[in-house]
C-alpha cells in the first residue's frame, strides 16, 4: 500500500535495530548497502552507513570512511560532546549535509542517491549528498537540429538540464522551483522562470496545475503535458516542447515558464502559441532574411494538410478548374485505375503512415528491408500494376515531405490526423467540404488557449507590434519588445541605443 | 460527454450518409475538346470531339498506338437534345468544360447563330472562353475530323494554330464566345468570326494516314474573316481586307507588308508593333471617325538593288508601307460600308465612348449613317532596323 500521508517513524536508539528495520522495509533489496563500522579509536563507537549502489559516488564514500577509520582519534570526540555534530567535520569534503530524524526521510534520501550516516545510541543521523549516477551526459541535438547554433541537447538528468539553462542566463532573477510529483516515482519536476519578466499569474497557474497532479508515476514530460494542458479536446499541442537549452532560454527571456522533468530530455515551455511551432531557433541565429523561411513552413503546413484533399476534390468534382493539358495528363494516368480518387488517396496516405510508423518502431537492423519495400514495391510497382495513378503517388510524396518541414515534430501530428478528415470532406463535398472544414478548423484554433494566452496570438487577436516575429522575423535590432501577448511585467527587451 | 458523443456521431453521419453527390471520376468523363454545329435540312448536326487521354499521353512511339480522339456526331432538332442523344453512342458522359473551339457551319452562320449560342452560354458546365470559328465551304464535322501530324487532337490544332496565326499574321482574329456575344449586344459594333477552310480532299484528311505522310495532301487553313450583321453571316473579307480590319481594331501584333520595288521583286517589311486609336465624334449632326495607326517595322527581306543606308530610301519605304496599310484599311471599310452595311469595326462604339451625346443623335439610323461615314485615316510607320545586315548582298554580286 502506498501511504500518501507521511507518519513520521522516528529512529530507534539501537543502530542494529535501525539497520534491520531499513533492510526489512526495503525488502532486502540487493542494491541497498548497509555498512557497520566500529571505530576502535573512539570507544568502539558504531557508525552505520546506508546507501544504494549505483546511485552514489563511491569515491566520496570511501574517502569519508577512510578519514573516519584512520584518522579519527579519541581526542576528536570528547565524552561531553555530541559525536554526530563532530562527525560533520569528517563530512566536510561532501557538499550538502543535513540532519534526518525519521525513516521516511531516510528512505527518500538513500533511494535518490544520498548516503545516510547513523550512530549507535542516537535517534537521528545525517544525510550526505553523494548523488552520482551514470547518464548520457550532454549530447548533440538529435530531433531539433540546426545548421547554425548550439549543438547541446538536454539529457535525462534534471540537474544537468537546469545547469544548461542557467549557463545561458546568468541572472539572479532566474528562479527555480522544484517539486516532487508521482506518489510512487517521486519524480522531481522543476519550474524555471525569470522573476520580473514573467507574468506572475502564469507562474501561479503552472504551480497550481502541477500541484493538482495526483498520479503514481511521471515518466516523461509528456505525462505532465497531458495533465496540465488547457484543452484536452484538440489535436493541436498547446504546450511547446523542446530538447534545446537555447530554445528554453529564449522562451524564458520572452516571459515563458519552463517545466523540466527529471528523467527526460524534453523540456516544456508554457504558454505556447500556434506560430511558435513554426519557429526554429535557427531563425534567430541566421540573418534576418532567413526568417522568410517561416512563410515556406506555413505553406508546407497547408500543403501537408490539404494536398491530397485538394487533389481529390479537383479531380472528382471540379475538373473545369484545371488547365486542359493538365486534366488530360491526369485523366490519362487514371485510365484503368480501379479505385475512385478518394479511395486511392486514402489508401496511399494510409500506406505511407504505416511505413512511417514502421520506420520509427522497427529495429535498426531491418531498416533497409522496409525502405526497399516501401520505396520500390509500393511506389513503382503499385503504379505499374495499375492499382494507383502516378499523380496520387506524387501528391502523397509531396504531402509526406512537407509534413517534415516543421521544426517542431508535435505540429505534424495534428496535421496527420486532420488530413484524413479533410480527405473525407473533399470526397463527399468537394472544395465546399474542404473550405467548410478549414473554416471549422480556423474557429477551433481561435478558441484554444494556452495558460490564458490565445493560441492564435498574435494573429488573432492581432497585435501589430508582435508581427515582427510571426510570419517573418525582423532584424534583432528592430525587435525592441518581448511578445506582448505573453503580458510580461517588463516587455522591453532592447534599450534604445543612445546616439 | 454522452451528449457530446451523440452530437459528434450525428455530425459524422451527416457527412457520411450524403454519399458523394455529383461526384464524377475523371475516368468516367468524356472530355470534349471541340464541338461543331451544322444545320442540314432544318436539323442540327452536333459533333463532339472527345479526347482519349490514354492516346494523347501515351509514351510509346511508333506501332499502332491508340487514336487520340473520337469524333461523334448526332442529328437532332435542338442542340441540347443532340448532346443528350449522343450518350447513346458514346461510352461516357460528355463533359464540356474543356472545349477549346466551337466550329459553326456556314449554313448556321447565315441563318443566325443566336439560337445555337444560347445553350453554350447558359449551361453552367461550359466556360465561355473557347474560340468560335466558322467552317467555310465545309461542314463543322469535316473541319473537326481533319487529322494533323503535329497535334494529336484536331481541336487543339485548331486552337493553337489560331493563336499562333493571330500573333504572326494580321488577317487572323481570334474571337471567344463571350467576346462574340458581347459584340452582338453592344451598340455600334457588329461581330466577326474567323473562317477556316479545307485545302484538299476531305476523305484523305480524316484518315490517320494523313498524319503519317511527310507532306499532307489535306490541310486546314485559317483564311478569311466572316462579317456578321447582328447574328447572321453577311459575307467574307478577303485577306487584304482582313488585314485592314485587324489594323483598325488594333489586333495586329506582328504582320508582313510587301512593297514592290521593281517589276518582279519585292521588299518585305515586318511590322513588329502597332497601336491603333479610333476616335469618333459627331460634328454638326455628321458622325466622323479618325483612325490613327502608328506602327513600327523592320526590313525583313530585300530582293532588289536599293541602298538601305540612305535615309531617303528608308523614308520612301516608310511612306510606301503607310500607303499600303491605308489601302488595306480603305478596302475593308469600303466593303463593310457598301456591300455588307455592317459596322464590324466598332466605329459607332467609339463615337459612343468619346461623344455619348452625339451618339444619341445618330444611333437611330446608324446603319445608313455608317454607310456614308467619312473615315479619316492617319498612318505613321517607323522603320527602325534592317536586320543583321545593312544593304543586301545582291548589289554586290558579280555582274552576269
Image (tube, rainbow, N blue to C red):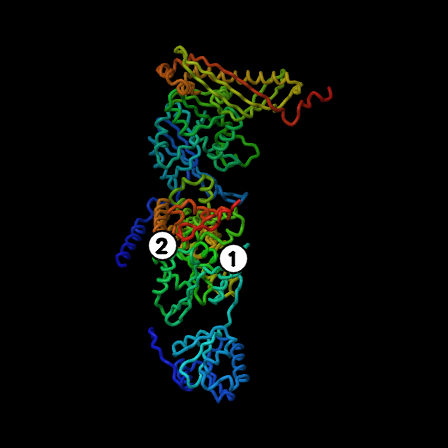
Residue B21 percent location from the top left of the image = 33, 46
| Residue for badge 2 | A452
Please give left or right for residue B323 compared with residue B18 in the image.
right
Marks 1 & 2 on one chain: yes
Q: Is residue B25 visible?
A: no
Q: Is residue A264 above or below residue A2?
A: above
* A82 or A330, nearer to the observer: A82
Q: Is residue A122 visible?
A: yes
Q: Is residue B203 left or right of residue B269?
A: left
Where residue A328 sits, quadrant-wise, is top left
Q: Position of residue A463 (x, y in %)?
A: 40, 46
Within-10-Å neighbours for mark 2: few <14, some 14–19, many 20+: some
Task: Provide the residue designation for mark 1.
Answer: A145
Please determine whether, in this image, residue A436 is positioned above or below residue B80: below
Chain under callout 1: A
User: Disc 2 is attached to a residue of which chain?
Assistant: A
Percent coordinates x, y for residue A108 in the rendering = 41, 75
- Residue at 37% x, 29% y is B117
- Left or right: A208 as drawn, with respect to B333: left
Amino acid at each position: 500500500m502506498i501511504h500518501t500521508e507521511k507518519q513520521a517513524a522516528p529512529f530507534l536508539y539501537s543502530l542494529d535495530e535501525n539497520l534491520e528495520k531499513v533492510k526489512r522495509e526495503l525488502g532486502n533489496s540487493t542494491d541497498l548497502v548497509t555498512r557497520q563500522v566500529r571505530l576502535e579509536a573512539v570507544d568502539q563507537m558504531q557508525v552505520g552507513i546506508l546507501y544504494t549502489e549505483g546511485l552514489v559516488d563511491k569515491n566520496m564514500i570511501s574517502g569519508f570512511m577512510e578519514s573516519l577509520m584512520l584518522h579519527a582519534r579519541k581526542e576528536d570526540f570528547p565524552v561531553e560532546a555530541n559525536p554526530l555534530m563532530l562527525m560533520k567535520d569528517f563530512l566536510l569534503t561532501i557538499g550538502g549535509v543535513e540532519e534526518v530524524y525519521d525513516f521516511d526521510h531516510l528512505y527518500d534520501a538513500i533511494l535518490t542517491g544520498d548516503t545516510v550516516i547513523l550512530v549507535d545510541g542516537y535517534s537521528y543521523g545525517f544525510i550526505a549528498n553523494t548523488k552520482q549516477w551514470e547518464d548520457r551526459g550532454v549530447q548533440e541535438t538529435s530531433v531539433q537540429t540546426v545548421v547554425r547554433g548550439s549543438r547541446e541537447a538536454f539529457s535525462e538528468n534534471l540537474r544537468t538540464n537546469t545547469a544548461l539553462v542557467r549557463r545561458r542566463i546568468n541572472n539572479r532573477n532566474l528562479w527555480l522551483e522544484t517539486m516532487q510529483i508521482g506518489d510512487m516515482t517521486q519524480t522531481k519536476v522543476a519550474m524555471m522562470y525569470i522573476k520580473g519578466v514573467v507574468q506572475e499569474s502564469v507562474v501561479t497557474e503552472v504551480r497550481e496545475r502541477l500541484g493538482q497532479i495526483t498520479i503514481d508515476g511521471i515518466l516523461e514530460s509528456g505525462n505532465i503535458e497531458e495533465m496540465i494542458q488547457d484543452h484536452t479536446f484538440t489535436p493541436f499541442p498547446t504546450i511547446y516542447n523542446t530538447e534545446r537549452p537555447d530554445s528554453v532560454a529564449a522562451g524564458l527571456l520572452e516571459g515563458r515558464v519552463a517545466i523540466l522533468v527529471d528523467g527526460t530530455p524534453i523540456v516544456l515551455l508554457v504558454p505556447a502559441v500556434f506560430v511558435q511551432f513554426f519557429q526554429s531557433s535557427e531563425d534567430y541565429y541566421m540573418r534576418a532574411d532567413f526568417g522568410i523561411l517561416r512563410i515556406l513552413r506555413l505553406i508546407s503546413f497547408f500543403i501537408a494538410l490539404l494536398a491530397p484533399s485538394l487533389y481529390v476534390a479537383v479531380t472528382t468534382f471540379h475538373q473545369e478548374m484545371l488547365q486542359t493539358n493538365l486534366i488530360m495528363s491526369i485523366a490519362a494516368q487514371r485510365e484503368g485505375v480501379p479505385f475512385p480518387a478518394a479511395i486511392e488517396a486514402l489508401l496511399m496516405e494510409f500506406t505511407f503512415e504505416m511505413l512511417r510508423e514502421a520506420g520509427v518502431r522497427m529495429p535498426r537492423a531491418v531498416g533497409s528491408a522496409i525502405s526497399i519495400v516501401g520505396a520500390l514495391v509500393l511506389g513503382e510497382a503499385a503504379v505499374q500494376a495499375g492499382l494507383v495513378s502516378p499523380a496520387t503517388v506524387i501528391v502523397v510524396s509531396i504531402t509526406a515531405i512537407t509534413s517534415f518541414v516543421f521544426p517542431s515534430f508535435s505540429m505534424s501530428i495534428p496535421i496527420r490526423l486532420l488530413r484524413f478528415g479533410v480527405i473525407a470532406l473533399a470526397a463527399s463535398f468537394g472544395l465546399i467540404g474542404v473550405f467548410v472544414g478549414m473554416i471549422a478548423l480556423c474557429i477551433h484554433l481561435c478558441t484554444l488557449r494556452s495558460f490564458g494566452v490565445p493560441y492564435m496570438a498574435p494573429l488573432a487577436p492581432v497585435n501589430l507590434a508582435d508581427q515582427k516575429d510571426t510570419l517573418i522575423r525582423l532584424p534583432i535590432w528592430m525587435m525592441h519588445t518581448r511578445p506582448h501577448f505573453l503580458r510580461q511585467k517588463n516587455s522591453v527587451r532592447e534599450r534604445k541605443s543612445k546616439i | 460527454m454522452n451528449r457530446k458523443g451523440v452530437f459528434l456521431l450525428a455530425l459524422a453521419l451527416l457527412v457520411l450518409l450524403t454519399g458523394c453527390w455529383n461526384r464524377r471520376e475523371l475516368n468516367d468523363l468524356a472530355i470534349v475538346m471541340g464541338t461543331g454545329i451544322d444545320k442540314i435540312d432544318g436539323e442540327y448536326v452536333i459533333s463532339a470531339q472527345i479526347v482519349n487521354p490514354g492516346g494523347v499521353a501515351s509514351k510509346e512511339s511508333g506501332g499502332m498506338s491508340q487514336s487520340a480522339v473520337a469524333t461523334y456526331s448526332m442529328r437532332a432538332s435542338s442542340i441540347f437534345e443532340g448532346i443528350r442523344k449522343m450518350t447513346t453512342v458514346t461510352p461516357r458522359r460528355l463533359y464540356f468544360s474543356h472545349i477549346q473551339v466551337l466550329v459553326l457551319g456556314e449554313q448556321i452562320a447565315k441563318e443566325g447563330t443566336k439560337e445555337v449560342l444560347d445553350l453554350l452560354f447558359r449551361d453552367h458546365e461550359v466556360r465561355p472562353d473557347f474560340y468560335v470559328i466558322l467552317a467555310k465551304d465545309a461542314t463543322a464535322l469535316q473541319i473537326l475530323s481533319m487529322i494533323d501530324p503535329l497535334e494529336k487532337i484536331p481541336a487543339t490544332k485548331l486552337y493553337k494554330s489560331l493563336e499562333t496565326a493571330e500573333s504572326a499574321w494580321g488577317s487572323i482574329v481570334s474571337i471567344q464566345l463571350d467576346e462574340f456575344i458581347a459584340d452582338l449586344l453592344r451598340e455600334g459594333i457588329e461581330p466577326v468570326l474567323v473562317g477556316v477552310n479545307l485545302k484538299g480532299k476531305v476523305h484523305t484528311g480524316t484518315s490517320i494516314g494523313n498524319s503519317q505522310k511527310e507532306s499532307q495532301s489535306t490541310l486546314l487553313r485559317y483564311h478569311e474573316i466572316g462579317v456578321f450583321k447582328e447574328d447572321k453571316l453577311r459575307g467574307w473579307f478577303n485577306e487584304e481586307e482582313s488585314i485592314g480590319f485587324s489594323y483598325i481594331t488594333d489586333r495586329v501584333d506582328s504582320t508582313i507588308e510587301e512593297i514592290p520595288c521593281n517589276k518582279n521583286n519585292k521588299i518585305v517589311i515586318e511590322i513588329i508593333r502597332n497601336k491603333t486609336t479610333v476616335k469618333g465624334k459627331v460634328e454638326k449632326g455628321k458622325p466622323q471617325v479618325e483612325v490613327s495607326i502608328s506602327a513600327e517595322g523592320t526590313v525583313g527581306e530585300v530582293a532588289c538593288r536599293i541602298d538601305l543606308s540612305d535615309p531617303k530610301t528608308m523614308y520612301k519605304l516608310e511612306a510606301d508601307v503607310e500607303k499600303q496599310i491605308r489601302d488595306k484599311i480603305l478596302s475593308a471599310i469600303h466593303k463593310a460600308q457598301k456591300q455588307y452595311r455592317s459596322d464590324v469595326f466598332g466605329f459607332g462604339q467609339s463615337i459612343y465612348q468619346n461623344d455619348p451625346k452625339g451618339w444619341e443623335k445618330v444611333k437611330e439610323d446608324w446603319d445608313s449613317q455608317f454607310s456614308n461615314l467619312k473615315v479619316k485615316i492617319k498612318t505613321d510607320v517607323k522603320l527602325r532596323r534592317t536586320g543583321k545586315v545593312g544593304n543586301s548582298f545582291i548589289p554586290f554580286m558579280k555582274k552576269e
